[in-house]
Amino acid sequence: GASSDGTRRQVYYGRRVQYYFFFFFFNYTATTEIYTLSLPDALPISGLSSAQERYIGLLNNARNQKSPLSDSTTRRFQDLASKYPEFEFDPHTGVSKFHSDILFSSGSAQINRKASPLLQDFADIMNEEDARRLNILVVGHTDDKRIIKRSTASLHPTNWHLSTNRANSVLLALSKSGINEARMGAAGYSMFQPVTPNTGDKTRAMNRRVEIYVLAPDAVVAGWDPATNRN
């Protein structure tokens, strides 16, 4: 399956690979926008089908809910952000952001060795008693540069592949660091969810990132019901 413009979104959950396709279009200025969890503003739901309203309602609820992290876990993540400049943490939402340049070399989905201590520290926090009940969604993003190099394209033909493969690499690294795979999911959004316009090297570096959403035990996102993933 594919969207109206031929793109495909790949979502990896635990040991299974599934594909989900979301077509929520809103006409503002003759452009098409694809909404995801990372949007800063609430999504409009008027004039949509009941299925669309339900999905967007889930996203709005996830965005508006208080971080599921305890105060002590929040402080641990804030300390982690102070220790690693390439790691950002939002205490209000519980969202963590890894700059891709610390995790990966250009065009690669193989995690750099220098990122291993950061990922291990992250996993240690998530495996503490008051965070062990929480789930994790890993989301990969790229900048707007198309993949041209033949050696890169042989492994990641498009930015969809690269963003999803990088998210999968982070998920598997966290698994090796001790986080149960049944607690995790991964997704890739290619270049279509930039945090800033791609106007130069600095802004493109900001858009190349991996975000981790910490989810409450009962959170249902993109068809993933955590109640069915406990092995």
Image (cartoon, helix red, strand yellow):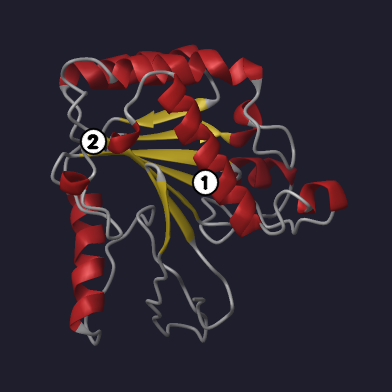
Q: 10 Å neighbourhood of mark 1: few (<14), some, or many (≥20)?
A: many
Residue assigned mark 2 = 231
What residue is shown at x 21% (from left), y 75% (from top)?
53
Quadrant of res 191: bottom right
- Which residue occupies the foreground of this view, 79 or 113? 113
Mark 2: which secondary structure?
A: loop
- Residue 186 visible in the current orientation: yes
Q: Residue 221, image x and y in percent?
A: 26, 55
Q: Quadrant of the C terminus?
A: top left
What residue is shown at x 18% (from left), y 71% (from top)?
54
Number of numbered labels in the structure image: 2
Which of labels 2 and 1 is toward the front? 2
Q: Amino acid at mark 2?
A: Asn
Identify whether 22 is placed above or below 116. below
Horizontal side of residue 15 vs 231, given as left or right = right
Residue assigned mark 1 = 140
Horizontal side of residue 30 vs 113, given as left or right = left
Q: Residue 134, image x and y in percent?
A: 21, 32
- Which residue occupies the foreground of this view, 29 or 109? 109
Which numbered tag is attached to residue 117?
Answer: none
Q: Residue 98, image x and y in percent?
A: 51, 32
- Residue 78 visible in the current orientation: no
Q: Amino acid at mark 1?
A: Gly
Identify whether 70 is placed above or below 64. above
Identify whether 32 is placed above or below 94. below
Identify whether 87 is placed above or below 120. below
Marks 2 and 1, the one that precedes in the sequence:
1
Quadrant of res 199: bottom right
Mark 1: which secondary structure?
A: strand
Quadrant of res 45: bottom left
